[in-house]
Image: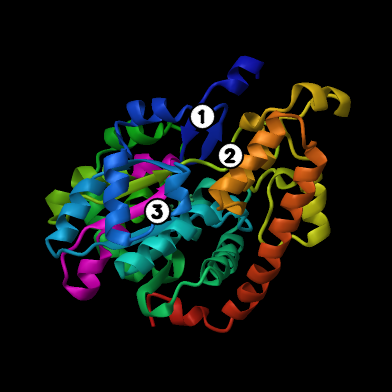
Amino acid sequence: MTDEDRNEMVVTPWEVRGKVDYERLIREFGTQPLTDGLLERIVKLTGEFHPQLRRKLFFSHRDLDTTLDLYEKGVKFVLYTGRGPSGPVHIGHLIPWIFTKYLQDKFKTRLYFQMTDDEKFVIEEDLKLEETTHFAYENSLDLIALGFKPKDTYIIFDVQDIDLLYDIALEAAKRITFSTAKAAFGFQESTNIGWIFWPAIQAVPCFIHTKLTGEKVPALIPAAIDQDPYWRITRDIAQKLGYYKPAQIHCRFLSGLGIGGKMSASEPETSIFTTDQPATVKRKIWNAFTGGKGTAAEQRTTGADPNICTVFQYFYFLFEEDDKKIAERERQCRAGETLCGECKTDLAERINEFLSEHQKKREKARNIVDKFHIKR
Ligand code: TRP
């Protein structure tokens, strides 16, 4: 692979590579930008300008405006998001889940959460079914640790719950042609047929609320924008099946601690897993890519570049909610008043504080995970 290929932007549900140009994704995927007007509307309805909205972590949507129109007319929505359990959860995964919790708390609405052990098994060559099923269980502990409540949170474990999903999956699959799926996902002659059918299963939770309760309501999906191809094909068929088109609110990727690309469990040294121990977190942060200069002396005179710094990015998106403090950190960095070592030490400390609490809640979640199971 040449450097040029490596830098070229690729965003698909199974691969994110190169420098991601979010404006270009909005144009190419045909989504809508999350405008200030729409942000104001959310703030008005929720009474809070969530940090992830303030920092423009969420930047694009489909039909969020019409979903809010319906909401204001008294038609509620349900939330839907999910996880492909191919390994342990890293802190980048928590971003849309934390935001989902905020939406759930403010709009008092139900969440369907899909654990796609089936998807990861058919797609990932090296994973066995018992491994993805195991990760589905382990990953659900991370979700529960964020404070979701069983009363309005329903986790779907695909393999175990397939009987519940199958009729809707068939209705969806029957209406999606191979040529549509091929165009959306880039399937090849050599693609296994499990993978080709699978998108019908990711469509199901958009519609399952009606089956379970008889209520006809739209689903709003907070997720990273790489999942968009799934929603394009689902939106095409929704009305034919008598449902609302599912709406989306899309977030950016938290990049790994190396250069470029999103945080990926397949590159363990550049991802902070939720189960990492303090010394591991320190080591990973210590090796992170920053916007620092070759020598301390040079950095003191010319300053560093927070725009390209992964450490700054972690503060910005997750670990420093205070707008004044983040602005001050940025200023000091640009002015050469702080060196990278100081930021790294601060960040490792912040992350370890967060993880020590998270890990306790995660263990407690083992006792209550059954209460979240969609079949209960
Ligand atoms: N396909 C997703 C993944 O690989 C998992 C998933 C299923 C999902 N349903 C979803 C993600 C809804 C976001 C929203 O990670």
Mark toward the viewer: 2 or 3 = 3
Horizontal arrangement in the rendering, residue 253 relative to residue 31 (left or right): right
Residue type of the residue flagged with mark 1: Val
- First reached walking from the N terminus: tag 3 or tag 1: 1
The percent position of residue 353, horizontal first and vertical second, equals: 71, 64
Q: Which residue is mark 1?
A: 20
Q: Are marks 1 and 2 in contact (CB under 8 Å)?
A: yes
Residue 2 seen from this side: no
Q: Which residue is mark 3?
A: 49
Query: Magenta stretch containing residue 226, yes or no?
Result: yes
Residue 164, numbered circle = none
Quadrant of the frame with the N terminus: top right
The percent position of residue 48, horizontal first and vertical second, equals: 38, 58
- First reached walking from the N terminus: tag 2 or tag 3: 3
Q: Secondary structure at mark 2?
A: loop
Residue type of the residue flagged with mark 3: Phe
Residue 262, numbered circle = 2
Query: Residue at the location (83% across, 57% down)?
Result: 279
- First reached walking from the N terminus: tag 1 or tag 2: 1
Horizontal arrangement in the rendering, residue 62 relative to residue 256 (left or right): left
Residue 290 seen from this side: yes
- The span from disc 2 to disc 3 (Cα, nearest Å) is 26 Å
- The span from disc 3 to disc 1 (Cα, nearest Å) is 26 Å
Query: Residue at the location (47% across, 49% down)?
Result: 52
Q: By what rule are the colours in the image chosen?
A: rainbow
